Image (cartoon, rainbow, N blue to C red):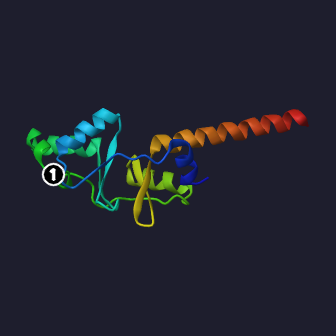
Amino acid sequence: MTVASILKTKGNAVETASAADTLHDVVRKLEAHGIGAVVVTDADKRVEGILSERDVVRSLARKGPGVLEQPVTSHMTKDVVTCAPHDLIDHVMEKMSAGKFRHMPVVEGGKLTGIISIGDVVKHKLAQAESETAMLRDYVAMT
């Protein structure tokens, strides 16, 4: 199974921010949409960074509430690990586990085309396991 199979079910919508946004702008966006990360992109939808709830908490803990008025670029993760629609889900899951992050932008042709979370991956893997179990039960019942 590939990342494209997750996006086919989930969709390609991604909440983004620009480098001009403040940390406070992004925090509002996270809360308003009930999401855990925002991808920072340029005008051409190229990924410049990602800001997660974890990044926000770390910035607040280290520097205090004044950081909320600083640009998002001062607090985002700049070395973003991305995947492509054709990447295998198992490979993406390994990258997320090894890097200890929960959100991965999907990039194709250098542009943001979606985002997947560890929750999306787990949900997809569970559905796959349930499907395989049902097929095995049907096979055993037929023999």
Secondary structure of the residue carrying numbered label 1 = loop
Q: Residue furthest bottom?
A: 109
* Residue found 64% across the figure and 42% down from its top: 128
Q: Quadrant of the C terminus?
A: top right
Q: Quadrant of residue 59?
A: top left
* Residue found 54% across the figure and 59% down from its top: 87
Nearest to the observer: residue 29 or residue 66: 29
State the residue position of label 1. Answer: 71
Nearest to the observer: residue 57 or residue 12: 12
Q: Residue furthest front?
A: 43
Q: Quadrant of residue 66?
A: top left
Image spot of residue 86 (x, y percent): 56, 60
* Residue found 74% across the figure and 35% down from its top: 134
Q: Residue furthest left?
A: 66
Q: Residue furthest right?
A: 143
Q: Would residue 90 be found to the left or right of residue 130 on screen?
A: left
Q: Please tell me how crowded label 1 is: few (under 14), some (14-19), or many (20+) other residues with Cα within 10 Å.
A: some
- When the figure is inspected, residue 18 is found, relative to residue 67, above or below; the finding is below
Image spot of residue 130 (x, y percent): 67, 36
Image spot of residue 50 (x, y percent): 30, 52
Image spot of residue 117 (x, y percent): 44, 45
| Mark 1 residue type | Pro
Nearest to the observer: residue 125 or residue 46: 46
* Residue found 15% across the figure and 51% down from its top: 71
